[in-house]
Image (spheres, rainbow, N blue to C red):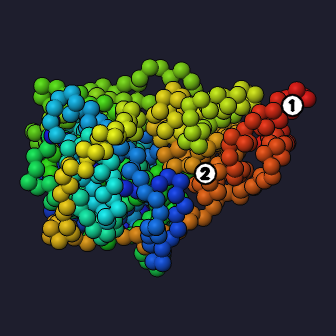
Amino acid sequence: MWGRPPSAVRRAKPGNVLARSKQLEADFMSDTILVVVEQREGKLNRVSWETITAGQTIAAATGWTLEAAIVGASVSALAAEVAAKKVAKVYAIESPRLEPYTPDAFAAALKQFLTTKRPQLVLMPHTYQVRDFVPKLATAMGRTVISDCIGFKHEHGKLVFTRQMFQGKFAADVSFASDAPWFVTFQNGAFRGDKAEAGVNAAPVETVSIEIADGVIRNKPQEVFKEAKQAVDLTQAEIIVSVGRGIKEQKNIEMAKQLAEVLGAELAASRPICDSGWLPMDRQIGSSGQTVAPKLYLALGISGAIQHIVGMKGSRTIVAVNKDSEAPIFEIADYAIVGNLFDIVPPLIEEVKRAKAGN
Amino acid sequence: MKILVCMKQVPQKDAPLKLNETAAWIREDVSYEVNEPDAFALEESLRQKEKHGGEVVVITSGPARSQQVLREALAKGADRAIHLEDNAFVALDAFNTAKAFAAAIKDEKFDLIFTGLQSDDYGYAQTGVILAELLGWPHATIIMQIEKTDAGIKVKRELEAGFFQFVDMPLPAVLTIQSGINKLRYATLIGIKQAKNKPIRKVTLAEVQSAIGGNLQKIERLYVPQKTKKTEHIEGTPSEIAKKLVDKLRNEIRVL
């Protein structure tokens, strides 16, 4: 069964966290999981549901209580949205100084909250925003973050978290060697957001007002903006031919382009290719580019670094061509071709042409 | 501006890696290279120095082999280097690595510290931010542009899904640099020659030992990830492979 029966869920009265800190310290135990969901400009980041699922799964394995928190200037409406899920409680951690996002304010607010509340485990999605503040927060508390995890194991009463290392060539099981709270971030796609269980009743929402002193916030962020309008929407493509470092030189892009043309595919690339200017940035797939799920993803000379994989692992069929039989891309490929792409692509172009002509 | 660039030596991208006998780390008899985002961080520091004057200092930790990244940086134009030299540094977590760096530079006065946004081996994406917190400095991550202003700097942060944001911040500060922020230069022959006379300060483990402690997280085991997908290998000569694949595209994947 999941967590504790509702009757055992302890309730705290709404009010100011600073005024109640003594009571809370005595009140909360070390067997709580806290998921900190992410919001941007008043909207929940959908990856938050994945982290809720992660929290529910760990709660089921450990028997710990699951709670959630959301941080911002005015987030009680979003907190109510989270409270519909199977969680014991949701905290809306608020201060006018939490908008716009700054690492200084987020770390200060969560440090105050967590120091009082002392959960055992704090889970967050491994987003660019979390990456920006969570190492600071953990360090300020003398704690550590096991970052970018893809799963967990509960072995003989001990929690270990699985993360990729060496660009996905290895997985590592990592444990905490420090006191709570333990911070863990989960990679996009590690858990299924649509599996987040709804609660029978809405969980209580408690608003926690945080004081952030003058001078704490040092950065002055400006408006978030999008560079030139994205010319290519790769998310709509049925077939994507994608090139990586294995393409070696800019002039070889032409060959991949020909293959894309005969297949009726969009041409895309991993980050290094766009960094080199061989293809425009709007054709980049991965954590800093577009996330796609076409019928066919044909990866040419892509090793399969984590940052790329997160952008294409949802593809229905993945065909990978790589000369390195150990390349991580083969871990997620449906069809693997170990070989030199310069040998394989030219006859493939001819063969596709022939097949199309025969139709 | 006086800039420190934190650099790391990592196994080459296509190096075949094997587990060592502890099964908690790799066998280290592989080829190494500079962690890619760190190369962009170095390039950015050199460009800032060319614009505004100052000094570029590079720092790394690791055994003797890791001096290579410092040599390359000096050849490209860094002024001097700091090497925390000991095999023990390889196994430190991000928290302790940052503590060791902070201890090694305690008598220096930098305006900026750059790191790559993450390393290709551990992939923590944390060391720069931790270092900022230890020093009490502001930071910004995943940086694609840096401009000096009257009050400090204005940086361009990359956000997800094609979004960006400019952030004004005071100095000193720590920035983690994204790959592709600039175009990398090659070392010149003159640069390589001059590098031989540039100073590398060695820092021993003993010198920073009091600043570091036990790791806060522990790698229990390292292993080849279990496959979740059944992969079918297509084999043969290139033309046979092409024929077989087209057959699958038509009959199994149904996109032709």
Quarter of image, res B117: top left
Is A139 placed left or right of A350 in the picture?
Answer: left
Q: Quadrant of the N terminus of chain B?
A: top left
Q: Element type at marker 1?
A: helix
Which amino acid type is shown beneath numbered disc 1?
Arg
Residue A109 placement (x, y as % from top left): 22, 48
- Chain name for mark 2: A
Residue at horizontal 62 percent and vertical 54 percent from the top: A324
| Residue in the foreground of this view, choosing between A246 and A239 | A246
Q: In the drawing, what numbered circle is on residue A354?
A: 1
**A160, above or below B108, in the image:** below
Residue drawn 15% across the image and 68% down it: B207
Residue A329 image label: 2
Q: Which mark is residue B44?
A: none
Q: Is residue A145 left or right of residue A306?
A: left
Residue at 75 percent of width and 30 percent of height: A263
Q: Could you say which is closer to the camera, residue A237 or residue A244?
A: A244
**Amino acid type of the residue tagged 2 in the rendering:** Ile
Nearer the camera: disc 2 or disc 1: 1
